[in-house]
Amino acid sequence: MKIRLENEQETQLLGSELWRILPKKCLVFLNGDLGAGKTTLTRGVLRAAGYKSAVKSPTYTIVEEYHLINSKLYHFDFYRLKDPEELEWIGIRDYLEEQSLCFVEWPELGKGFLPEPDVVLTLKQQGEGRILDIQELSKNMEKTLLLNWKNSSRML
């Protein structure tokens, strides 16, 4: 399923929709070039969850941890990994075993150390907006998103 997102606000709005439908334990892969909106989408999820503080890309820290009401969200960015084995050093298995949402930017750089994702989201810039391609989505989640977005010109 592909959705056209006209601007940053719509990218965050879709993030808030994802917050409503993603299970409390879910591994989400975020694909896209630099500046494609991966962190913006994650920010939308966090805002919908009630998180009010700054949300930044974990490019240098590799992981940012967010404590939410009754849950946690981990936002990973593997862009600067030199070797996927570095994930063992940061304790990736411990993070992924928790009852939490895990959003992973640049997941291909962790190949061999990451399990299969529950959801794969690919963002591509297109003019001022973006195209979001949603893959690996359960039928129930897809149905919910379609109900909220199908009557708009954003569906492709």
Image (cartoon, helix red, strand yellow):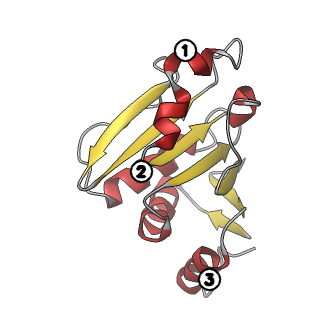
Q: Are marks 2 and 3 in contact (CB under 8 Å)?
A: no
Quadrant hosting residue 133? bottom right
Dot placed on the residue nearer the N-terminal end, 2 or 3 = 2
For the C terminus, which image quadrant? bottom right
Q: Amino acid at mark 3?
A: Lys
Q: Nearer the viewer, mark 2 or mark 3?
A: 2
Q: Rounded to the nearest whole Å, what is the CA distance between mark 2 and mark 1?
A: 21 Å
Viewer-closest of 121 and 40? 121
**Mark 1 or 3, which is nearer the eye?**
1
**Which secondary structure lies at badge 2?**
loop
**In this rendering, is residue 32 above or below 91?**
below
Q: Residue at x 23, y 55 (%)?
A: 69
Q: Residue at x 47, y 64 (%)?
A: 23
Looking at the image, tell me whether mark 2 or mark 1 is earlier in sequence order. 1
Where does residue 75 sit, x and y in percent of width and height?
47, 37
Label 1: element kind = helix
Q: Which residue is mark 1?
A: 89
Q: Amino acid at mark 1?
A: Trp
Splitting the image into 4 quarters, where does residue 48 fall?
bottom left
Whether label 2 touches label 1, CB < 8 Å? no
Tag on residue 99? 2
Q: For the residue marked with disc 2, what is the amino acid?
A: Gln
Q: Is residue 8 above or below residue 81?
A: below
Residue drawn 40% across the image and 45% down it: 73
Residue that carries the numbered disc 3 in the rendered image: 143
Between disc 1 and disc 3, whose residue precedes? 1
Q: CA distance from mark 2 to mark 3?
A: 24 Å
- Residue 58 in the figure: left or right of residue 147: left
Q: Say few, some or many: other residues with alpha carbon within 10 Å of mark 3 (under 14 / 14 to 19 / 20 or more).
A: few
> Viewer-proximal residue, 21 or 12?
21
